[in-house]
């Protein structure tokens, strides 16, 4: 393997750094660059073998588009390292003791670890968003050291100053008004996301279903070509989680599949169905960049325009549904 983390002579325990529906995520219990291990011990219909296959395909497409087409700069993907099968008795014999005793061998995907934000950035986030009574606890919590930011450019709430009572820094979502209020470059994030899904659709020919973006530190040597922030410091967008990604055809059926996945996904992308001025502007930034990057990949913007038209149609349906629900709520209040 390419990382000493998995060396058979290593004895550093593995520590859980995350958990999702697909399974739990682990890394050596030490600071600095490392491998991450996604164990297939979650939902029964999720597969790290599929994650591995899609990861390799998308990583290859991203490298080509970044190098040859100059797209999606300031986006990173964790390097794919190895897929370990649950029945690889020799691998597990040498490493099982580094997991807690209750964890049994299972299929496990090994990739580069996305490093968490530095302590200074975490403390600033706690001061901004955590209830005062919990700040000291969160700042000293081991679990909350594993801090990656999920940038939700497609969601906002009005109560920006009201901190959540269920605060954690692990996979912390920040909504678009929170990102904007911190002075983060949301237009630039939107542009990189537009490049990225154009690559996923047209180059990797995938529907981008359930992929995730996080804000996290750059690799060593990438600091000068990174986003800069007073709160977060140097950071980049990272793309991860490919176990739900499916192949698409470059026709109406493929566009419909990808368009519906766009709205099923967590709201990382700007959306066409919101009425706030900033959200409308972000959608314009995103859609314009998507057309440009799609043209670079395909040679013309025909499919990209069909995709954007379909996204806007689905967005209008969502907006009308919200208005209908609001009208029902108002009628129920009047009837009380």
Image: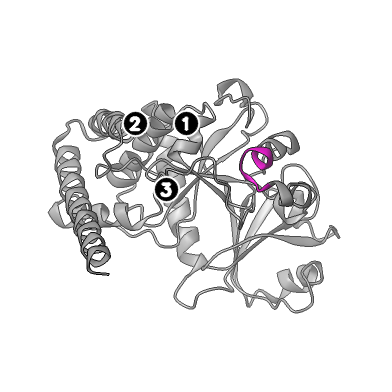
Residue topped by disc 2: 278
Q: Residues within 10 Å of mark 1 (few under 14, many from 20)?
A: some
Q: Nearer the viewer, residue 146 or 100?
A: 146
Residue 67 makes an appearance in the image: no
Bounds of the magenta segment: 125-131
Q: Which residue shows up at 67% across the image and 43% down it?
A: 115
Residue topped by disc 1: 180
Distance from disc 2 to disc 3, alpha carbons, whole Å, reads 31 Å
Quadrant location of residue 157?
A: top left
Q: Nearer the viewer, residue 287 or 176?
A: 176
- 299 relative position to 136: left or right: left
Distance from disc 3 to disc 1, alpha carbons, whole Å, reads 30 Å
Q: Do labels 2 and 1 touch, CB within 8 Å?
A: yes
The mark found on residue 58 in the picture is 3
- Label 2 sits on a secondary structure element that is helix
- 9 relative position to 74: left or right: right
Q: Which residue shows up at 77% across the image and 69% down it?
A: 99
């Amino acid at each position: 393997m390419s990382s000493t983390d998995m060396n058979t002579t290593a004895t550093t325990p593995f520590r859980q750094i995350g958990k999702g529906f697909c399974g739990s995520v682990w890394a050596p219990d030490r600071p600095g660059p490392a491998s991450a291990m996604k164990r297939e011990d979650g939902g029964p219909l999720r597969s790290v073998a599929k994650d591995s296959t899609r990861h390799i395909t998308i990583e290859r497409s991203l490298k080509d588009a970044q190098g040859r087409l100059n797209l999606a700069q300031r986006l990173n993907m964790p390097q794919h390292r190895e897929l370990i099968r649950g029945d690889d008795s020799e691998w597990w014999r040498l490493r099982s003791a580094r997991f807690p005793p209750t964890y049994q061998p299972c299929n496990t995907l090994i990739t580069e670890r996305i490093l968490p934000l530095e302590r200074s950035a975490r403390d600033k986030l706690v001061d901004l968003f955590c209830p005062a009574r919990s700040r000291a606890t969160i700042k000293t919590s081991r679990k909350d050291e594993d801090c990656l930011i999920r940038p939700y450019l497609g969601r906002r709430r009005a109560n920006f100053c009201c901190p959540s009572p269920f605060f954690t820094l692990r996979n912390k979502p920040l909504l678009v008004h929170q990102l904007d209020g911190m002075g983060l470059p949301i237009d630039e994030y939107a542009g990189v996301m537009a490049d990225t899904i154009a690559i996923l659709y047209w180059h990797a020919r995938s529907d981008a279903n359930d992929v995730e973006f996080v804000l996290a530190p750059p690799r060593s040597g990438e600091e000068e070509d990174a986003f800069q922030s007073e709160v977060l410091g140097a950071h980049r967008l990272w793309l991860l989680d490919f176990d739900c990604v499916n192949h698409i055809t470059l026709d109406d059926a493929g566009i419909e599949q990808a368009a519906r996945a766009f709205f099923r996904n967590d709201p990382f992308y700007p959306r066409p169905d919101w009425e706030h001025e900033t959200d409308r502007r972000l959608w314009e930034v995103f859609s314009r960049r998507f057309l440009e990057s799609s043209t670079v990949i395909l040679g013309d913007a025909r499919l990209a325009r069909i995709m954007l038209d379909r996204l806007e149609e689905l967005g209008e349906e969502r907006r009308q549904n919200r208005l209908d629900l609001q009208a029902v709520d108002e009628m129920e209040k009047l009837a009380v």
